Image (cartoon, rainbow, N blue to C red):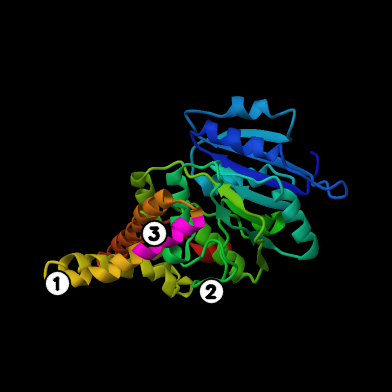
Amino acid sequence: MQKYKYSLIIPIYNRPEQIDELLDSLTKQTFSDLNKVDFEIIVVEDGSSITCKHIVDKYSTQLDVKYFFKPNSGQGLSRNFGVENASGDFIITTDSDCILPPHYMETVDEYLNKENLDAFGGPDMAHPSFNNLQKATSYAMTSLLTTGGIRNKKKSLAGKYYTKGFNCGVKRDIFLKIKGYWDFPPPGEEIEFNYKLYKNNYKIGFIENAFVYHKRRTNLKQFFKQVYLFGRRRAMLNKLYPETSRLVFYLPLLFTFFVLLTVIAVFICSYTILPLALYVFLVLVDSTVKNSSIVIGGLSILTALTQLLGYGIGFLVEFISRSIFRMKPHKKFHLNETI
């Protein structure tokens, strides 16, 4: 087996059109003459009924890409499977709905040659070609007004930086040592993965220029479902491992209560709507300026409210189920066994 410096792991489920754009972006990676970065690509088909092998085969002469099919198990275990079949010294994970800018691999390589990191992450953003809803969704997931900047900043309201599976790198030997991702409902597996890295005192860095374009193909209903699950998993992990909890993780829950009280109070006094109206106005202005579009600014109001309320409701549902009804944690989630 040929040895590589980097192995890119891409799990995919029923989205062949997405892998086409991602692999195409990898054929366009630019390097200086003195900095040719060698990498392989591992595509893990996670039990899809609509497979992407024909798409992967299309790039076999341009990229060193390997295709594997396995029974469905979710992103975390699919990443583990990919690492088991990888040869790179450094593992990079990304999602099938991402596009890598041409400088991505060179930027990562240059940074890691200067800084001896055990793991790294980078930001995500919207490409100019994305549609308005995709740009508004990207705003809702990355803005200081919605998520506190915890996804795209080295330091945020959450304190430590936490890598995200769509743009994450880790030394292969470390990935194997901490046993990768556990069988845990997403996105909880990413939070647990970071917990293990910090628990073992590994050096984690944030590479600001190593961003990816995250092309979320979603509508508001799907987006609500996604962030609802985010909220549930965060509340579950707060209960299991209180030391990972941060104030910023409770803000969507507080916002949800705030909106509920505002809706009730407005029937008593119409002026109680003003704080919420001010927040909506700030989102409109901020997104309009950042995206140079009042249409995207208007859509960002919807995506911001969806993000905060969906997360908050999910957090509340999980908190009630754990604290009041005493539901047990996921039976396979035993973190101490992996340290």
Kindly identify the amino acid type of the residue bearing the numbered disc 1: Cys
**Residue 288 counted in the magenta span:** yes
Instruction: Report helix, strand or loop for mark 2.
Output: loop
State whether residue 339 appears in this view: no
Q: Is residue 270 left or right of residue 193?
A: left
Check whether the beta carbons of the residues at disc 1 and disc 2 lie within 8 A of each other: no
Q: Position of residue 309 (x, y in %)?
A: 32, 59
First to last magenta residue range: 281-290
Instruction: Report helix, strand or loop for mark 1.
Output: loop
| Residue at figure coordinates x 54%, y 41% from the top left | 129
Q: Is residue 21 above or below residue 137?
A: above
Which is more toward the observer, 288 or 37? 288
Badge 2 or badge 3: first in the primary sequence: 2
Q: Which residue is mark 3?
A: 284
Dividing the picture into quarters, in which one does residue 42 lie? top right
Q: Which residue is mark 2?
A: 159
Q: Is residue 213 left or right of residue 295?
A: right
| Residue at figure coordinates x 47%, y 49% from the top left | 135
Badge 3 or badge 1: first in the primary sequence: 1
Q: Is residue 5 left or right of residue 222?
A: right
